[in-house]
Amino acid sequence: MRKTIFALAIAAVAMTTVSCEEDYKLYDTNQVDAVSFNYYNSRGVADSVITYNFGYDIAEQHEIDIPVTLMGVPKADARSIDINVVADSTDMVEGVNYTVARAEIGANAVRDTVKIMLLRGHDDEIQTKQKKLRIEIGTNDQLRPTGFKTFTVKYSDFRITQTPGWWSQWSPLPKYSFENAQLFFKYFYELMPKANKDVYDELIKKYGDYFVNAGSTGGPFAFYEPILTKYVLIPMYNDHKDDIEWQKVPSF
């Protein structure tokens, strides 16, 4: 019985050794390495779409970072990723709506990002219509596609003309307009992190960027009015007390 068990163990080891040798032979170091998109959304789920609206952002461009992963051996030099536009699924125009700012696997890297720069101010249609770019990883002499090889970016510049619920008429804010809200967030993002980074992080975590998750009750001015007034609204008022209409003068 012991001899039988020993013989079976020897056979298992031999088969495992042969299997490993065969698997090793399957990998050819001379083959072209592969790359795939590897994006996970805010819920931690693999996804192939990113959507962005400029909204209150005052920037004229916005960078979209799409993670990519290498399947192969890192190289000492950066390698270009061939990015092709899927024309029948795209209504963005390169140079008008977007540019491909970067598409490569860096030197000695197994992960990197494809960078798409979204452009503002060249296409009035994005104020009323969401536009789409679908890209696909192609094949060149350095890299080929594998796994998730297509990705979609959607964007718009919808203007928020209706007063949001958190923009209280009893707060020391300007009279609401889209432009005044843009100005408020310009001061907020420039000044609040310097004044109190912990409170700034708390506000973003609780209400989201540009307070998109804030409701009409329990909003930022319900709980944070004193600090927002001191570090954001008073400097804003001092710079713009004569050129915009205020609901009331901010004071601390």
Image: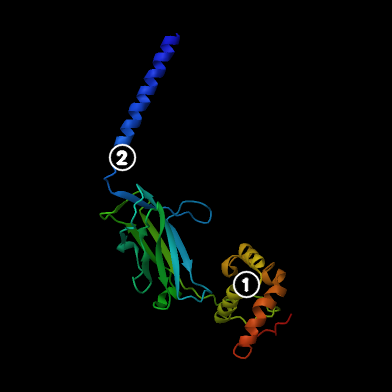
Q: From the top left corner, tell me how far across and down residue 112 is, in percent.
A: 41, 56
- For the residues bearing labels 1 and 2, Cβ distance under 8 angstroms: no
Q: What kind of residue is marked 2?
A: Tyr
User: Height in image: 113 above or below 250?
Assistant: above
In the picture, measured across the screen, residue 101 lies left or right of residue 203, that is left
Q: For the residue labelled by badge 1, is the local secondary structure a helix, a strand or a loop?
A: helix
User: Height in image: 234 above or below 102?
Assistant: below
Q: Nearer the viewer, residue 93 or 138?
A: 138
Crowd band around label 1 with a 10 angstrom C-alpha radius: few (<14), some (14–19), many (20+): few
- What residue is shown with label 1? 194
Quadrant where the N terminus is found in the figure: top left
Q: Please give the label number shown on residue 27.
A: 2
Q: From the top left corner, tell me how far across and down residue 222 is, in percent.
A: 71, 70
Q: From the top left corner, tell me how far across and down residue 196 is, in percent.
A: 66, 69
Q: Nearer the viewer, residue 208 or 160?
A: 208
User: Height in image: 42 above or below 1?
Assistant: below
Say which quarter of the image contains residue 164.
Answer: bottom right
Label located before the other in sequence (1 or 2): 2
